[in-house]
Amino acid sequence: MKGFIHEDFLLQTDTAKELYHNHAKMQPIIDYHCHLNPEYIANDHTFDNLGQIWLEGDHYKWRAMRANGVEEKYCTGKDISDWEKFEKWSETVPYTMRNPLYHWTHLELKTAFGVDKLLNPETAKEIFDRCTELLHTPGFSARGLMKKFKVEVVCTTDDPADHLAYHLALKGENFEIKVLPTWRPDKAMAVENPREYRAYLEKLSEVSGVAIHKYNDLIEALRKRHDFFAAVGCRLSDHGIEEFYAEPYTQPEIEQIFNKVYGGKALTKEEILKFKSAMLYEGALMDWEKGWTQQFHYGAIRNNNTRLFNQLGPDTGFDSMGDFTIAKAMSRFFDQLDKDNRLTRTIIYNLNPRDNDLIATMIGNFQDGSVAGKMQFGSGWWFLDQKTGMEAQMNSLSNLGLLSRFVGMLTDSRSFLSYPRHEYFRRILCNLIGNDIEQGLLPASEMKFLGEMVENISYKNAKQFFNF
């Protein structure tokens, strides 16, 4: 009898099985957007137990546990043991059926540790002990797990003020897996809180060697750090924005707005939008000059629960989808760059699935034939990082663009156990195409091309697109 996670998991037809096993399965992983801690990679970190590697910082699991009536101390508490937290998670897992966490949990147990049993209160101790034992062996350190999953490239997410010491150390020792930084300048445009912004500018000034007193000083400091990131191997930028910013502005206006926030005064909503528009545009020019790929993750409403945000801080599981109206601003932003032929490779990730067709049609406006798939519709992100979300994204891209040029999946994760998300995506991709072939919607005579298409989306498109 097959276990729940078996070799043909999610593959509903013989053609899907052929595509996955003969084309997708063996491809290496290019994880071009994640939130892994580079220090863990540089020091080849070992994890104490399964609870630590699985639950530390995982707001997906925390949200499910809270919804299941688990007290906060078992999610983020400092005085609760890893086993006690894991035990509460094991009690929650059966209740996650039809949530992607149920698939991810058992896929990770099977793929990383060879565990076939379903996680529940009865199996929790056995699974915890077995996986913890394995985590103390060399093949399950941070680097060991990356090698186990055939990872070829990892791009972390880093602030312009970050020292990148661990990336430099890895580069110096010629570690076989590329670990590259990604430029994430969100704090450089976060002018809503003048006091916090001034503190950030002081930090940026220190690491860049540029005394920041005026707007032009800020741009100079960012350019110096942008150059430094490039020297360390950076190929991508990333922007976590609520919406796209493309308000009209003049240079004197932006300089005055900077002086105002630098002096500790709160900005109006209009001033904030103008400043963010200027910063987003300047960043896009820097990326174009270096031939980087720019990424935009938009549409989240963050820190909705004020009480628990004050208690726990950001990134603890209190964010949700937003419903921003973005089409006109997005169009103006890209058009402003394209008018001067200074629009670089771009990936757009939406959080609200209502925008799928919007994004799929928007990227078509700015494909210019210079690069295949220059404008990319990013894979299902965050709340859409699940079977239905992935299929919807790929269907929109297929209907309105070219799925064949898609750069595929990423983990967007802080966990070294999240690489099976690439396998999950590949299985869903192969099932989607396989079902079409079996239903006569795609020609069975073109299996060679379709097999190559699966290989490209799984790995080769990303390798070529980012020039890794």
Image (cartoon, helix red, strand yellow):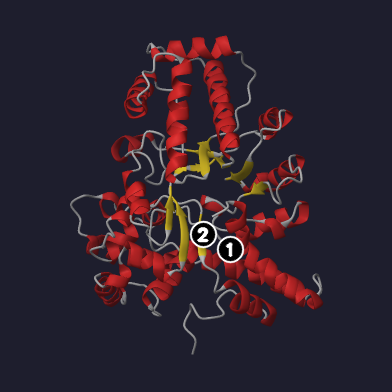
Residue type at mark 2? Ile
Q: Is residue 318 left or right of residue 280?
A: left
- Specify whether residue 92 is in view: yes
Quarter of the image for residue 304 reads: top left
Going 69% across and 66% down the picture, which residue do you hit? Answer: 453
321 in relation to 95, above or below: above
Q: Is residue 439 left or right of residue 53?
A: right
Going 52% across and 38% down the picture, which residue do you hit? Answer: 239
Q: Is residue 185 left or right of residue 205?
A: right
User: Which residue position is annotated with label 1?
Assistant: 459
Quarter of the image for residue 96 reads: bottom left
Q: Residues within 10 Å of mark 1 (few under 14, many from 20)?
A: many
User: Which residue position is annotated with label 2?
Assistant: 30
Going 73% across and 40% down the picture, which residue do you hit? Answer: 366
Q: Could you say where residue 338 lies in the image, as x and y percent from the top left?
A: 71, 32
Label number found at residue 421: none
- The C terminus is located in which quarter? bottom right
Q: Secondary structure at mark 1?
A: helix
Going 30% across and 41% down the picture, which residue do you hit? Answer: 312
Residue type at mark 1? Tyr
Q: Secondary structure at mark 2?
A: strand
Q: Are marks 2 and 1 in contact (CB under 8 Å)?
A: yes
340 in relation to 411, above or below: above
Q: Could you say where residue 418 lies in the image, as x and y percent from the top left?
A: 43, 62
Q: Could you say where residue 413 lies in the image, as x and y percent from the top left?
A: 43, 54
Q: CA distance from mark 2 to mark 1?
A: 7 Å
Q: Residues within 10 Å of mark 2 (few under 14, many from 20)?
A: many
